[in-house]
Image (tube, rainbow, N blue to C red):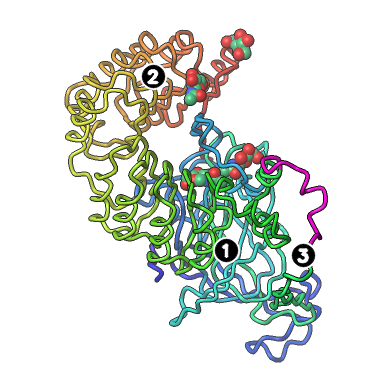
């Protein structure tokens, strides 16, 4: 069942009449609402009514600032450009958040799959889309795919036959200007009416966060009947079951002369659907395509709209050696059930080391229990944005004794006292290299000092938007804990102090002196840092590549320009509002 996440905004629906010249009205059926019009087709124009699902956002869950919920409703920024809180902003941009562990990427990912993040929005009325316009109000260019779904999220009865069609797909682009634009790519005709769209984005080439203000769906209620959809034969050619007679001495030609390993190598370059198709060509290739060695690692994420219990069941017998599985984004709206997933994990999970399950809303407590029981060697578990998983489900994670990486971003796990977590980490996890405490509201000065006392080999530390830290430092007159942190963490490469308003020159001096390996620093939103302190920092940290000083009131655009000229290797970010 769909849980509507969205903060419902007012539905904006109005009838727009195209002048007969601007609208391709040939062959339209005339809608029931305007039976008398003969030469103009009524086109319905709607803003998104509600945001149903998404993979990430910059803002906090309890807030409206920079959250995906802002994608619903009429535009609030457009035609202005700039960094505004009431827009939809994803969590990352550029390559700054990429992990450089090489084993991380999954092979076999199709070259046409670029998507990093997604956003699903519902509209009031189902239409056959004629255009989709996205108002991008800051750093446009991230949208790589627009899809339409046949399911009406507002219908009382849901069909099990849910289809997704690509309306438009493209490569990520680098738009030279951060200014607002209306992105309105040509859309394909589809054979069903839709009121559920999905945008997929890749912000890799952007200089800063992309901001989306509104999404406009235009379409007609009646299908364009003159366009005949190609009819794809549902029936597959009959298999010659009785083949025993004719495969004597037929052989496989030159393939019989190739060593088994060589064919395995050739087959290993195929994407998963091609592997499945090739398996149907002959017995020799079927054996190769079904060999569990072809499924040591498997990413099903690019096929999120195709995967269901049945296809998962088919893969089961081949995946007995599976070590890394990426099912992120798959199985939603009933396509994969908790039962189907559990049976797959029971059959294929014993050697799993890495399991990516971002946005898998079918997961329930039973699934986590099966993971904990079966995948005893699991080292990495990603449950990002599994925001419908009940809090008690997380208890099973404690049984995973070998975990090295755990992602609980946007889940319902509630940690009341992060300081306790910090003290456990500092005694038990002294070799911790990377820790992301983004928006951990209960983390205080005390917790941070506790962490510093044990975890001194940290290379990455994200303390962005940790609001208690910020008020704590105010209380003690300055941010002693940040200075303490800088002194202890000489290996730091990435440090995010986003929106910790009391970061001051003294803190930067400590960072400059004690963290020579620093590559990325984010001090967005402080009033206390001066240009002189920034300059000293840039001199002392030769490896610095990213410095975000947006909303730092003492650092004006001229300072940024000067420093950028002096330090051409550093991307100095300062966002603007117009
Ligand atoms: C990641 O990159 C940094 C330099 O940017 C390097 O020092 C480190 O060894 C790399 N880690 C891995 C696992 O490659
Ligand atoms: C696998 O999962 C992660 C986390 O959900 C995702 O970011 C990554 O792009 C995935 N897909 C592939 C094809 O590697
Ligand atoms: C995003 O786009 C970049 C640039 O085209 C590409 O290298 C990268 O692999 C894409 N990311 C994903 C997750 O597909
Ligand atoms: C910038 O980086 C290049 C290549 O890493 C290096 O040769 C050059 O000296 C650097 N320039 C400055 C001003 O640090």
Say left or right for 172 vs 481. Answer: right
Of label 2 and label 1, which has the lower sequence position?
1
Q: Mark 3, residues whose alpha carbon is within 10 Å: few (<14), some, or many (≥20)?
A: few
- Residue 110's place in the image compared with 502, above or below, is below
| The residue stretch that appears in magenta | 247-262
Q: Which residue is mark 1?
A: 306
Decide: marks 3, 1 in contact (CB < 8 A)? no
Q: Which mark is residue 492?
A: 2
Residue nearest the observer in this picture, 412 or 424: 424
Q: CA distance from mark 2 to mark 1?
A: 42 Å
Q: Which residue is mark 3?
A: 247
Decide: marks 2, 3 in contact (CB < 8 A)? no
Asked if the magenta segment contains residue 137, the reply would be no
Q: How many marks?
A: 3
Of label 2 and label 3, which has the lower sequence position?
3
Q: In what element is the residue under mark 3? A: loop
């Amino acid at each position: 069942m769909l849980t509507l996440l969205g903060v419902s905004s007012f539905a904006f629906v109005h009838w727009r009449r195209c002048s007969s010249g601007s609208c391709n009205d040939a062959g339209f059926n005339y809608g029931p609402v305007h039976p008398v019009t003969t030469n103009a087709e009524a086109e319905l124009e709607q803003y998104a009514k509600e945001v149903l699902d998404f993979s990430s956002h910059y803002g906090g869950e309890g807030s409206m600032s920079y959250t995906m919920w802002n994608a619903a409703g009429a535009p609030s920024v457009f035609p202005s450009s700039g960094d505004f809180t009431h827009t939809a902003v994803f969590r990352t941009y550029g390559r700054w958040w990429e992990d450089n562990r090489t084993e991380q990427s999954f092979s076999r990912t199709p070259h046409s799959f670029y998507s990093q993040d997604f956003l699903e929005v519902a509209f009031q009325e189902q239409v056959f889309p004629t255009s989709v316009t996205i108002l991008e109000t800051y750093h446009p260019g991230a949208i790589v795919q627009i899809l339409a779904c046949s399911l009406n999220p507002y219908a009382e009865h849901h069909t099990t036959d849910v289809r997704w069609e690509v309306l438009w797909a493209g490569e990520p682009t680098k738009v030279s200007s951060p200014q607002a634009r209306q992105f309105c790519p040509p859309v394909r005709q589809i054979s069903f009416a839709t009121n559920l769209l999905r945008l997929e984005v890749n912000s890799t080439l952007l200089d800063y966060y992309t901001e989306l203000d509104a999404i406009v769906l235009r379409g007609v209620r009646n299908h364009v009947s003159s366009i005949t959809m190609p009819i794809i034969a549902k029936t597959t050619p009959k298999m010659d079951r009785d083949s025993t007679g004719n495969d004597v001495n037929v052989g496989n030609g030159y393939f019989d002369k190739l060593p088994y390993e060589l064919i395995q190598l050739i087959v290993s370059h195929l994407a998963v659907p091609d592997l499945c198709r090739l398996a149907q060509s002959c017995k020799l290739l079927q054996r190769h395509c079904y060999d569990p060695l072809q499924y040591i690692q498997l990413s099903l994420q690019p096929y999120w709209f195709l995967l269901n219990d049945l296809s998962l069941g088919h893969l089961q017998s081949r995946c007995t050696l599976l070590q890394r599985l990426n099912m992120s984004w798959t199985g939603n709206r009933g396509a994969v059930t908790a039962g189907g997933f559990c049976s797959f994990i029971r059959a294929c999970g014993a050697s799993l080391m890495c399991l990516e399950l971002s946005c898998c809303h079918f997961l329930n407590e039973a699934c986590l229990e099966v993971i904990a029981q079966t995948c005893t060697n699991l080292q990495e578990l990603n449950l990002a944005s599994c925001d419908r998983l009940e809090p008690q489900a997380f208890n099973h994670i404690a049984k995973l004794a070998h975990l090295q990486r755990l992602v609980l971003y946007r889940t319902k796990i509630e940690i009341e006292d992060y300081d306790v977590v910090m003290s456990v980490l500092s005694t038990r996890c002294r070799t911790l290299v990377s820790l992301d405490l983004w928006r951990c509201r209960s983390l205080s000065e005390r917790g941070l000092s506790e962490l510093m006392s044990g975890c001194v080999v940290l290379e990455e530390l994200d303390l962005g938007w940790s609001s208690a830290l910020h008020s704590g430092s105010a209380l003690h007159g300055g941010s002693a804990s940040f200075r303490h942190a800088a002194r202890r963490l000489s290996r730091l490469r990435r440090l995010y102090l986003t929106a910790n308003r009391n970061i001051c020159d003294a803190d930067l001096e400590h960072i400059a002196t004690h963290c020579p390996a620093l590559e990325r620093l984010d001090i967005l939103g402080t009033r206390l840092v001066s240009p002189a302190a920034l300059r000293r920092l840039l001199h002392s940290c030769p490896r610095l590549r990213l410095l975000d000083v947006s909303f730092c009131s003492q650092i004006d655009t001229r300072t940024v320009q000067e420093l950028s000229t002096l330090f051409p290797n550093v991307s100095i970010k300062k966002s603007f509002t117009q």
